[in-house]
Amino acid sequence: MSGLSLSIASSDDHSAAFEILADCLIEPGYGFFPQALEATECHKLVAALEAIEQKNAMQRAGVGRGETRALNSEIRSDSIHWIERDQGPDLFNHWLDWTDQL
């Protein structure tokens, strides 16, 4: 996959990036885009997530949904935080705007 470019910051017209993403999801079923975010956006995202973690706002990731949701550290030992619109830095809104276009 080297040479593919998928950036949320490069322009307002993401049709080419979406086509690359769709092609990757069809075959092989995933995509790896190491430069999808610019370095400054990555640093902002890391800082925002560190602030969320310091507020103890991360939740242990579970397995299943609703009433069947369970915590099982042998399967998932990570923590999560849902990105919601207007609940964090502008980067969160920018990311959600980009994914809404998908």
Image: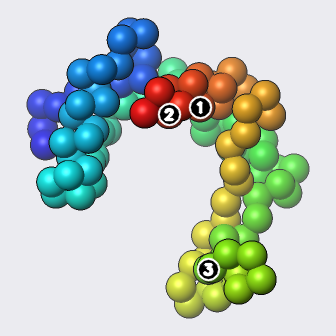
Residue 26 in the image, given as x and y percentages of width and height: 20, 52
The answer to whether the residues at label 2 and label 1 have Cβ atoms under 8 Å apart is: yes
* Quadrant of the drawing holding the C terminus: top left
What's the residue type where badge 2 is placed? Thr
Residue 66 located left or right of residue 32: right
In the displayed structure image, the side of residue 42 where residue 90 appears, left or right: right
Q: How much space separates mark 1 and mark 3, taking CA atoms?
A: 24 Å
Name the residue carrying label 2.
99
> Residue 68: percent from the left, percent from the top?
71, 86
Q: Which mark is residue 49?
A: none
Query: What residue does disc 3 label?
Result: 63
User: Residue 89's x, y, as percent?
Assistant: 72, 26
Q: CA distance from mark 2 to mark 3?
A: 24 Å
Residue 29 horizontal side relative to residue 94, left or right: left
Please determine whether, in this image, residue 101 is positioned above or below residue 34. above
- The amino acid type of the residue labelled 3 equals Val
Q: 77 or 71: nearer the eye?
A: 71
